[in-house]
Amino acid sequence: MSTTTLILISVFIGIAILGIAALIFLQKHRTEKLRTRFGPEYARALQESGDRRQAEASLEERKKRVERFKLRPLAPGDCARFTESWRSVQARFVDDPRAALTEADQLLGDVMFTRGYPVSDFEQRTSDISVDHPRVVENYRAAHEIALRHSQGQASTEELRQAMLHYRTLFEELVNEPEMVARKAAS
């Protein structure tokens, strides 16, 4: 082989190695970015799919879907109205925990709708909420699971209390989040 051929082969191999290294770096960067953004939801998606690429593609799709929404902060009047409604629901829990749990779930749906989230089936709602609220979406799932057991007459009063606490965590985050939504809307 001539020296020129050896140089060309070496350059080609070097370019291929750099390309592979860049691809690996970009994949790791994407993974870390998704892990940081989605937190525990990343692990959940990975566990559900069993495949990192599939889980990451699913999370990216969620992110793109939610970016198309016109999310907005609650107007001060809505915020006050929802907060008062929540206080009322919590107060009713003492006398009628089962009805209060149902009302809490409905109130969360109203808050989500007012903020700009489509309120479709539960799984889609949790996927949508997980994009901007990955650390509390598991609370929403846990509360919903208890609510389902409650509808079948299988949830204790203590479980209903836990569900209310889970709902409250998401409620507070959705109602008290005007700064983040305003920043997103401006960008």
Image (cartoon, rainbow, N blue to C red):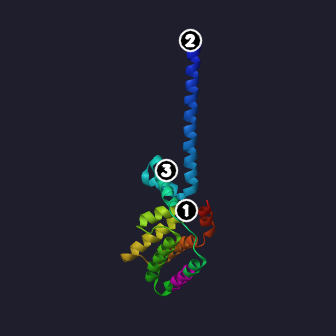
Magenta residues?
82-91
Q: Amino acid at mark 1?
A: Asp
Horizontal and vertical percent for residue 109? Answer: 47, 73
Q: Amino acid at mark 2?
A: Ser
From this view, report whether residue 127 is shown above or below residue 85.
above
Q: What element does badge 3 sit on?
A: helix
How packed mark 1 is, by other alpha carbons closer than 10 Å (few <14, some 14-19, many 20 or more), is some
Q: Amino acid at mark 3?
A: Glu
Q: Which residue is mark 3?
A: 56
Residue 16 inside the magenta-drawn segment: no
Horizontal and vertical percent for residue 40? Answer: 53, 58
How packed mark 2 is, by other alpha carbons closer than 10 Å (few <14, some 14-19, many 20 or more), is few
Q: Nearer the viewer, mark 2 or mark 3?
A: 2
Q: What element does badge 1 sit on?
A: helix
> Residue 120 versus residue 27: which sits nearer the camera?
120
Residue at left offset 59%, top offset 66%: 181
Residue at left offset 58%, top offset 75%: 75
